[in-house]
Image (cartoon, helix red, strand yellow):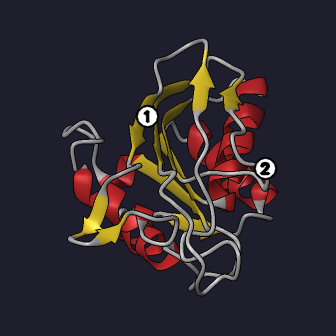
Amino acid sequence: MTLINNKVTKSELAVVGIYGAGGSNAGDNQALRAWVTEMGGAMFGPTEKSKARDFLMGASLQQKHLLLLGYSRGGTTAINLANLLGRKGISLNHLIIFDAHSVFDNRIFYLRYDNVQRAINFLQRNPRSAGRYGWWGTNPYWGSPLVSNFIKVQEIDFTGAFFRKGMPVSHLNIVRQSLASL
């Protein structure tokens, strides 16, 4: 994985993943869990921000490299958590979000503190079509941009891209597509 300096071992990492809404099996939550587990990390639900915060603060005291990942509503929680940690003076080595969104399309998220060394935002805004999720279609949500005045956020926009031939990248497969692109 090119995200992490080759000199950093798993024992020197603290990896936190935050599930999207709908439970651990919804959307692409399983793909995120598999990656975080492989890295020796811990998963939290989108409403468990205080537990994730405590985990990362404890790891910070041990001088570990902190990686925070979030999918969907968990991405929104991860951004909020990054800002909370910034207010406390705790740095993250990486913030990686997958299709973070609000219920309002076209929202922009902001990193408000200079505590994130590298941020990657995977998002898509492929068409919604009628289908499995009613009027939301088979692509229920669109991701939102992430902005920082302190670092250049790497925005990877899969709008118009395909997960597999003939299958657009959607909110429900973006984690798999994103991890495969790293």
Callout 2 amino acid: Phe
Secondary structure of residue under mark 2: loop
Q: For this rendering, which residue is in front, 144 or 26?
A: 144
Badge 1 is on which residue? 155
Q: Is residue 56 above or below residue 135?
A: above
Callout 1 amino acid: Glu
Badge 2 is on which residue? 104
Q: Residue at the top extreme?
A: 149
Image spot of residue 179 (x, y percent): 31, 58
Find residue 70 and report its image quarter: bottom right
Image spot of residue 44 (x, y percent): 65, 67
Q: Is residue 54 above or below residue 44?
A: above
Q: Earlier in the sequence, mark 1 or mark 2?
A: 2
**Residue that appears at 70% across and 75% down:** 135
Image spot of residue 55 (x, y percent): 66, 54
Q: For this rendering, which residue is in front, 8 or 25?
A: 25
Q: Residue at the front extreme?
A: 130
Q: For this rendering, which residue is in front, 40 or 75?
A: 75
Secondary structure of residue under mark 1: strand
**Residue that appears at 39% across and 75% down:** 34
CA distance separating discs 1 and 2: 20 Å
